[in-house]
Image (cartoon, rainbow, N blue to C red):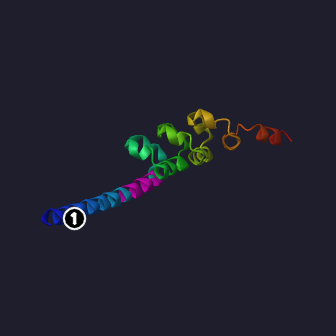
């Protein structure tokens, strides 16, 4: 019975520690997103890799500095939402888009490279 009691207490303490860590991460994440919005998305280059792979953080960065896409996790260079946010901010971010997305019609249009867009601008 004593072991079970101690195990229960340890388990409860571990859960509380996990919750505290999640809250700390959440606060750190909110502060980081605010910093990227206020001081500029280029600051993501100085962030830990875990934040370079966090979609919310990356969206905050590329939304005000599209070329920040260069410094994010490879998986997010292929995330259409992230890519379009980066291109809306700076069309030159197209250089850093994952190869498989470079031919996507929405990506091409956002980058200004769409054939549709070129045809319509000639009229």
Count of numbered marks: 1
99 in relation to 7, above or below? above
* 108 sits left or right of 120 in the view: left
Q: Is residue 11 left or right of residue 22?
A: left
Q: Nearer the viewer, residue 30 or 103?
A: 103
Q: Position of residue 30 (x, y in %)?
A: 41, 58
- Whether the magenta-drawn stretch holds residue 32 is answered as yes
List the single residue furthest toward the left: 2
Quarter of the rendering occupied by the N terminus: bottom left
> Residue 43 lies in magenta, yes or no?
no
Q: Specify whether 23 is left or right of 107.
A: left
Q: What secondary structure is found at the residue carrying circle 1?
A: helix
Residue that extends furthest to the right in the rendered view of this protein: 123
Quick one: which residue is furthest to the front in this view?
1
Q: Residues within 10 Å of mark 1 (few under 14, many from 20)?
A: few
Left/right placement of residue 26 relative to residue 72 reads left
Report the span colored magenta.
27-38
Task: Give the residue displayed 53% in from the left and 45% down from the top.
Answer: 65
Query: What residue is shown with label 1?
Result: 8
Question: In x, y percent, where is residue 54?
Answer: 45, 48
Q: Nearer the viewer, residue 35 or 24?
A: 24
Estimate the x, y position of residue 33 in percent, counting from the top left: 44, 54
112 and 7: which is toward the camera: 7
Q: Most prominent secondary structure in the magenta stretch?
A: helix
């Amino acid at each position: 019975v004593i072991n079970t009691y101690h195990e229960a207490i340890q388990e409860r303490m571990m859960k509380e520690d996990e919750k505290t860590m999640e809250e700390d991460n959440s606060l750190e994440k909110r502060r980081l997103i605010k910093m990227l919005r206020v001081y500029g998305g280029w600051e993501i280059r100085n962030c830990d890799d875990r934040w370079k792979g966090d979609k919310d953080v990356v969206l905050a960065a590329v939304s005000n500095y599209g070329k920040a896409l260069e410094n994010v996790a490879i998986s997010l260079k292929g995330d259409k939402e992230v890519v379009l946010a980066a291109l809306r901010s700076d069309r030159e971010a197209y250089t850093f888009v994952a190869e498989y997305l470079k031919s996507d019609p929405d990506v091409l249009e956002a980058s200004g490279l769409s054939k549709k867009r070129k045809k319509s601008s000639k009229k």
